[in-house]
Image (cartoon, grey):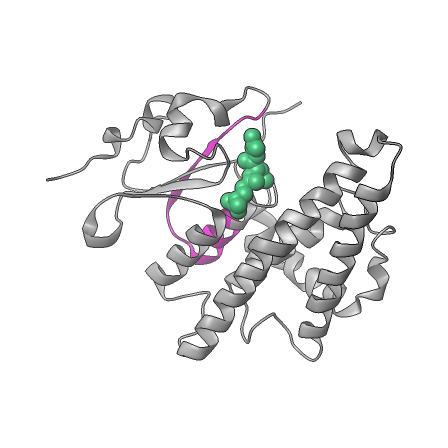
Amino acid sequence: MAFALSDFPITRKWPAQHPDRIQLYSLPTPNGVKVSIALEELGLPYEPHLVSFEKNDQLSPEFLSLNPNNKIPAIIDPDGPGGKPLALFESGAILWYLAEKTGRLVPRDQAAKYETLQWVMFQMGGIGPMFGQVGFFVKFAGKDFEDKRPRDRYVNEAKRLLAVLDQRLEGRAWIVDDYSIADIATFPWVRNLVGFYGAGELVEFPKYANVQRVLDAFVQRPAVKSGLEIPKRPAA
Ligand SMILES: N[C@@H](CCC(=O)N[C@@H](CS)C(=O)NCC(=O)O)C(=O)O
């Protein structure tokens, strides 16, 4: 049976202008930009759609039909395995899929490939959730809580994770060998922690010189610069 993109209810809210391209449903947050950066690096044709949190788009029935977990990013690849459309959510799964689809941004060597997966998981289970909690307690509603113990718990965990990453990057240009999806998963979060969240001082960021060095190299990449702005947010 042939599947068309229009069989996916999400396309009713976000119609595809280019149904032959990968459809990206996202917002330029640290999880969202992982996918736009990977797509820019790979040069795959794709069509970005903005999921507005101001409008609670992520809770709309159309979005939930693709991701019942109401979180960006999500994609549909019209040319998935077996030539059939594939819908995916969870940024780590999407990065892994795009790397496997193209055979790029992941080492060919099997052992190095699993090492890459390991560091993607380290980001997904550690850096993302913990840095996100730091954001809540430093930048968002939690910053007004008088009791600083919850904030300090996550700040201490963020420091511990930064130390693990820093040690890993000693004498290395990137997390595994060549630049990979492990770097694409990780550095948008590091950038956000010290940039948008403004938690650099709290986590004593200058202590992690290797992390700073690789973050600097990451943000210099043209695909990172463009991916960080996709999908475009509406002018304020
Ligand atoms: N583990 C998920 C987390 C995704 C996630 O937390 N996305 C946030 C933005 S960075 C979101 O969509 N939040 C909307 C909401 O919670 O309603 C992934 O990596 O894809």
Q: Quadrant of ligand 1?
A: top right
Residue 138, image x, y percentages: 80, 39
* Residue 20, quarter of picture: top left
Which residues make up the magenta segment? 35-53
* Residue 78, quarter of picture: top left
* Residue 96, quarter of picture: bottom left
> What residue is shown at x 24% (from left), y 53% (from top)?
81
Residue 14, image x, y percentages: 39, 26
Asked if one can make out residue 125 in the rendered structure from this viewpoint, the answer is: yes
Above or below for 205 versus 61: below
> What residue is shown at x 69% (from left), y 67% (from top)?
165
Looking at the rendering, in which quadrant would you find the C terminus?
A: top right
Residue 183, image x, y percentages: 58, 62
Residue 228, image x, y percentages: 59, 45
Which residue in the rendered view is the most extreme toward the top?
A: 55
Looking at the rendering, in which quadrant would you find the N terminus?
A: top left
Q: Is residue 6 left or right of residue 95?
A: left
Q: Is residue 22 left or right of residue 122?
A: left
**Count of numbered labels shown in the rendering:** 0
The foreground one among 172 and 1 is 1
Above or below for 164 versus 1: below
- Does the magenta-highlighted stretch encompass residue 39? yes
Asked if one can make out residue 232 in the rendered structure from this viewpoint, the answer is: no
Above or below for 23 versus 177: above
Above or below for 75 versus 112: above
> What residue is shown at x 64% (from left), y 56% (from top)?
187
> What residue is shown at x 72% (from left), y 73% (from top)?
167
- Does the magenta-highlighted stretch encompass residue 33? no
